[in-house]
Amino acid sequence: LPNRVWLPWDSNTPRVFWFISIHQIINTLFACYIDVGMDTLIFGLFLQTCAQLEIFENRLHKLIINKTVRDLGRKLSTSNKDEVEMSEIVRHHLIIYKYAKKVNIIYNQVFFFQFFESILVLCTCIYYLTKHINKLSELATFFIYTICMFVQIYIYCWSGNEVILKSTSVGDAIYCTGWPLLPVNEQKDLLLIMMRSTIPITFTSSFLITLSLESYGSILKTSYSAFNVLTH
């Protein structure tokens, strides 16, 4: 059979054997689709946060250029329309933080179980590789599966780390614009955005692990420590 399983009946007969084999193959395919779909969903939500921050910076940079060119070239004062546009920029920044907070609230328990399960699987796979496998074909299969688990955790941590870097770079992006040429009230709005960007957007695993590359290194160290406990 494709997978080791205990059955309450004899699986040596052709009909039963093929029925169980097809059933296991279909279950494996569905499990792969669900697993890949879940990982890409989380990955997409994280990158959506980075994309919105990129859009925010581009909109803000374009707005500041248009306002400074108009004010310096045409000697016109700020209009109500521009005030609305600046208020929309501020509102956009707040919505990005609300979006990230909502995603974190919905999926933080999922992150916790995912990391806990991944650490157990990694330790078990490595222990099984070192102790119980002698055939090269089985070794290759488990080795590829172990690498996939490492990559799966890395995708979560890398995308979370990108969100942290992108959210903290907003203040630098604002500072590199022509903000001194804006009215005082709009400078205050930008100052509040810059102060808010000093606190990065983070995605956590049940308030225990922050998804970042630093946490990825900590997870690998924890897995190695657990593996040493299993071997001794």
Image: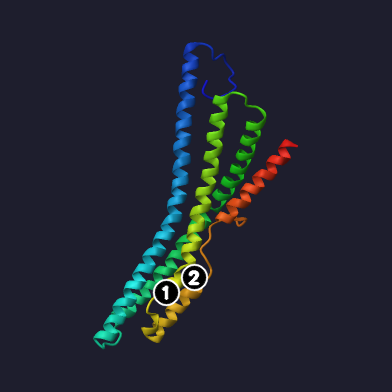
Query: Residue 32 location, x and y as percent?
Result: 47, 36
Of badges 1 and 2, the one in the foreground is 1
Q: Quadrant of the C terminus?
A: top right
Query: Residue 131 location, x and y as percent?
Result: 67, 30
Dot 1: within a 10 Å radius of its alpha carbon, few (fewer than 14), some, or many (20 or more) residues?
Answer: some
Picture layout, residue 111 above or below residue 87: above
Query: Residue 79 location, x and y as percent?
Result: 29, 83
> Could one spot residue 208 in this view of the protein?
yes
Picture layout, residue 51 above or below residue 3: below
Corner quadrant of residue 9: top right
The residue depicted at 51 percent of the width and 56 percent of the height is: 160
Picture layout, residue 226 above or below residue 24: below
The residue depicted at 28 percent of the width and 86 percent of the height is: 72
Q: CA distance from mark 1 to mark 2?
A: 10 Å
Q: Name the outermost residue toward the top.
A: 13
Write down the residue under mark 1.
174
Corner quadrant of residue 215: bottom right
> Could one spot residue 211 in this view of the protein?
no
For numbered disc 2, what is the local secondary structure?
helix
Corner quadrant of residue 137: top right
Query: Residue 28 location, x and y as percent?
Result: 48, 31
Q: Which mark is residue 197?
A: 2
Q: Earlier in the sequence, mark 1 or mark 2?
A: 1
Q: Name the outermost residue toward the right.
A: 232
* Amino acid tagged 1: Ile
- Tell me whether the residue at label 1 lies in contact with that at label 2, contact meaning CB atoms closer than 8 angstroms: yes
The residue depicted at 36 percent of the width and 64 percent of the height is: 55
Closer to the camera, 135 or 180?
135
The residue depicted at 33 percent of the width and 80 percent of the height is: 83
